[in-house]
Image: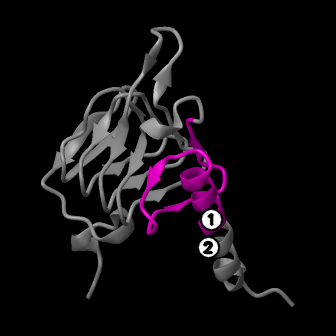
Amino acid sequence: MLRSLNQFIKLQRLVVGCKRLYLTKVWGMDIHPTVVMSLSARLDKTHPRGIHIGEGTYIAFDAAILAHDMTRAIKTDTRIGKNCFIGARSIILPGVTIGDSCVIGSGAVVTKDIPPNSAAAGNPAQVIRSGIETLKFGRLKDRIKE
């Protein structure tokens, strides 16, 4: 009898680790070994060396991180800092830098840089809160009981 899908967490982490290894070794992306991402997260393979993701970051399902724009013929670096949370179905456009300890809301379209310690949401994404502190995977520090 299946009690919970949590019993498969080790298998899921192993598969995600294989995906991260594939993206870094085969495609040349700069993804820290502690990054956790959904298997459905989409990272740009047109300019893979332009993807940089810092330690302790979590990328939720269907998030897209781009490092090229065909309409403007641009290939550029897209950077996500450490201890960030990138929400489900959000889109990070090419050339954007998301600072350390940021939370990007689900469905956000990030068109410009987000300063460190900020929460952003919307289309286009706007900073809705500054001065936040996050732990690993973008968990809000003031919401976690230690």
Residue 32 falls inside the magenta stretch: yes
Image quadrant holding the N terminus, namely bottom right
- Residue drawn where x is 28% and y is 66% of the image: 140
Residue identified by numbered label 2:
13
- When the figure is inspected, residue 39 is found, relative to residue 43, above or below; the finding is below
- Residue drawn where x is 52% and y is 31% of the image: 47
| Discs 2, 1 touching: Cβ within 8 Å | yes
- Residue drawn where x is 47% and y is 45% of the image: 106
Three-letter code, disc 2 = Arg
x and y, in percent, of residue 143 in the image: 28, 73
Crowding at label 1, few (<14), some or many (≥20) Cα neighbours within 10 Å? some
Q: Nearer the viewer, residue 122 or 97?
A: 97
Three-letter code, disc 1 = Val
Q: Is residue 130 left or right of residue 105?
A: left
Q: Nearer the viewer, residue 67 or 117?
A: 67
Residue identified by numbered label 1:
16
- Residue drawn where x is 18% and y is 58% of the image: 132
Within the image, what quadrant is residue 46 found in? top right
Region in magenta:
17-44
Between the C-alphas of marks 2 and 1, the distance is 5 Å
